[in-house]
Structures are given as structure tokens and as C-alpha cells.
Image (cartoon, rainbow, N blue to C red):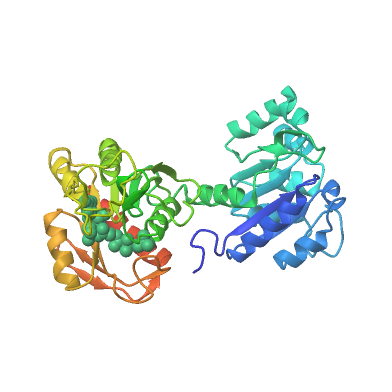
Amino acid sequence: MNDPLLSGKKILLGVTGGIAVYKAADLCSKLVQAGAQVDVILTEAATKFVSPITFSALSGRPARVDMWSEGSGQPIPHVQMAAAADLVIVAPLSANTQAKLALGLADNLLTATLLATHVPWVLAPAMESHMWANPATQAHAATLRSRGAVQVGPAEGRLASGAVGVGRMAEPVEILAAARRVLARDGPLAGRRVVVTAGGTQEPLDPVRYITNASSGKMGVALAAAATDLGADVTLIHAPLAVAAPYGVACVRVRTAQQMCDAVLERLAQTDILIGAAAVADFRPAAAATQKIKKVSSEEELTLRLVRNPDILAEVAGRRAETGRPAVVIGFAAETQDLLANAAAKLTAKRLDLIVANDVTEPGSGFGADDNRVTLLFADGRQEALPLMDKREVAWRVLQEATALLQHGRDA
Ligand code: PMT
């Protein structure tokens, strides 16, 4: 699946001198793999650590160093490169180049080009911890932030000197996530709050055993990522996940249905869109034993008494009827038979705007799979059956519908 944010974007990647340039090569590769067109400018100091050829090979475009080299075919390369860029990333950013950027100096191709840009900057400083802590460096960093630059890191850890402190360049995935966040901030859900539930709740029987289901959380994680890409502030309320939560998403880890319910209701008044992708246990053991349940040799059977858990989306419907929030509520229906009839019944009972029905018996779809085949059932009676797709594509479609429903509510 193409990266919806980075695909086709023109990224200007500045690389300054520091041992972290090896991570910049990885970042360049990741950006290219995401479909971005990457133009790299290195400072002279950066070339002491790595050859521009590395970046030319990774980006498939000539990496540049010198403002005055002939044969580039561009009479004033800094102005043209600045005008073409959608986003600037400087990684690693040395103390020296940070100071020049803060002061507006333009004494090499990188600083001259950045001075001519009118697009956001994502800066990933990397330096020895005393240099980072120096008041001059801190003042320059603050100046750049105050002008709108997004700073990622530096992180604490082992530095090139062998010392441990603050100064390590942020990891490429974090820089990538920050870049994606900047590109998303004018998206249609900018300023909106989206809450997604994910994963299978666990209902304890005793300190080491619990009742759960096969949800991996992949569907919910994909929904949270898609909402983030559309510019929303996203909270992922999740039971244990088999996959990593997306960067830039606020995570609330819960275990039981009751905890998930409490976490959702607590945020309801601030939520614009709620999407319930979690597989929530409808029942829990009436009492969780405080000690591990013993096997009694005389007993051939063990009876568990279960009691009802709250229905989170039904609770939400009750509150929403009073407050009008969240504006949009979307549920999922995991069915093993009569998919559409059962999903439609849940759509009505839980007073949802949209229910995403998945037949969880289909191989390669539903629980644990990377793909899903779903049918969208809307409260107004519309239905749309989608083909088997990557869960990220399903998520993207669901978020497009959520955005339209939100927009429709505002216009109504
Ligand atoms: O996590 P994955 O491995 O990626 O798998 C994805 C999925 C199959 C779990 C997902 O696509 C899905 O179908 N999620 C909903 C699973 C489910 O519990 O469906 P349900 O039909 O039992 O519940 C209907 C809706 O009510 C769901 O939105 C559910 O979150 C919600 N619910 C259910 C029970 C309950 N007590 N409270 C609820 O709010």
C-alpha cells in the first residue's frame, strides 16, 4: 500500500556533520520506500563521515554539497530546491548548523537553501551532551521552535564519545513519524479528537488465567494510524496488542471490558469520532479468584459463573442522546453467520452511524490477519461491500466515511 502522506512528496533532506549520518542514510531510504522524492544536501562536514554517493544511490537523485559546483544544470540551485520542497528535514542537525539557521546565515548550500524555503522544517539535533546543554545551543533551538520548526529529540543514550547523556539523534522511525505528522496537520481532521478501541479484552479468572479472544489489535491500530494521517488527535484505548501502536498516538492501555468502558466514557465529552474496533468480552467471571485456582483431584468438572460486562457502545449511545457527543460513532461487527442481518441489528441496537461488518470465518480476513473483507452499513440504509483489502486500506476507507459523516453533521 502506498504511503498516503509521503507518496509523491518532495522532501529536502539536509545532512550535517556528526556520527549519526549513518542513521540519516536509513532515513533517506525509508522516505524513498514510502514513495517520497528526496533531494539531499550535505554539508562539507557531513562528507567527512559519509560520501554523497551513498545518498545519491539511496535517493536515485544527485546528492549535493557545493553551492558553486558547475554542471548541476541549475544556475541558482538553492532557490530552485527551496521552491520545489514540500517539507525540510535536517538529520542530523549539528550545533553549528543549528546556530546558523537560528541566525539566518547562508554560507553553504544547505543553509542558503533553507533560508529560501517557505515550508515546515523538521529538525533532529545530534551532538555531544555538553554542547546540547550549552545555553547558546538551547537558545538557538528555542528560536527555531518559536518560528515553527518541529524538533525531534535529541534522545538520551550512549554518545559517540562513549559518555551517556542527552544528544543522540532520534531514531529514523521517529523522525519519519514527525515528518508525517507535520504533513498531516492541515488534513480534514485537523483539530478533531478521535478515540479508537482495539484488541481483545482479558477477563481474569485468577492471577494467571483469563478469558479472551483472538483479536490482535491490527484493525484498531490501522484505524488510529489513518486518523492520525488525516490530522486528528488520536487516543487509542487498547487491550494487549500483538502489534506496535502507531507513533504520535496517545495510548491508554487497559485489560478488561470494564476498564475499557471507563476509559472511553471518561473521554466522551472531548471526542468527535469514536470507533469501536475492540473485541470486547460480553461476559466476565463473576469473581476473579485471588489465588491460582487449584485442581481438586475429586472433581471432574469446574463450573464458571459469568456475569454481563457493560456494552460500551450502548453506554455511549445513552450519553450521546443527552450531550450530542461524540458526533460520529462507528462500531464493528464480528460475525460467523448471517453477517448483514446481525450487523444491521447491532447498528440499530447500539444507535451507530456506521457499522463495519466482517465475516470472521473467512480465511485470511478478520481476527489476526493483515487483511479484512468488510461491508459498510450506514444508519441511513446505505450499504457498501468492499473487496478483501489490507487492513490499512480498510482503515483509510472507514476514516474517509467518518470524515464525511462529521462534515455532514456540521452541515445539517
Ligand atoms: O484485532 P484484529 O486481529 O485486527 O481483528 C479485527 C477484529 C475482527 C477484532 C475487528 O475487525 C472487529 O470486528 N472488531 C469488533 C469485534 C467485536 O467484538 O464485535 P461484536 O460484534 O461482538 O461487537 C459489536 C461492536 O460492539 C464492536 O464495535 C465492539 O467493540 C462493541 N462492543 C461489544 C461488546 C461490548 N461489551 N461492548 C462493546 O462496545
Outermost front residue = 298
Q: Quadrant of residue 360?
A: bottom left
At a point 76% along the width and 50% down the height, the residue shown is 21
Outermost top residue = 135
Direction from residue 385 to residue 94 in the image, left or right: right
Whether residue 408 is visible to the viewer of this picture, yes or no, is no
At a point 42% along the width and 64% down the height, the residue shown is 392
Point out residue 20 in the picture as x, y percentages from the top left corner.
Answer: 75, 47
Which quarter holds ligand 1? bottom left
Q: Quadrant of residue 73?
A: bottom right
Point out residue 407 in the picture as x, y percentages from the top left corner.
Answer: 27, 52
Taking depth in this image into account, of 266 and 393 the one nearest to the observer is 266
Whether residue 186 is visible to the viewer of this picture, yes or no, is yes
Give the vertical position of 110 relative to 364 (above or below): above
Direction from residue 60 to residue 216 in the image, left or right: left
Mark count: 0
Point out residue 403 in the picture as x, y percentages from the top left corner.
Answer: 31, 55
Taking depth in this image into account, of 127 and 80 the one nearest to the observer is 127
Point out residue 267 in the picture as x, y percentages from the top left corner.
Answer: 30, 38
Taking depth in this image into account, of 120 and 235 the one nearest to the observer is 235
At a point 34% along the width and 47% down the height, the residue shown is 194
Direction from residue 170 to residue 325 in the image, left or right: left
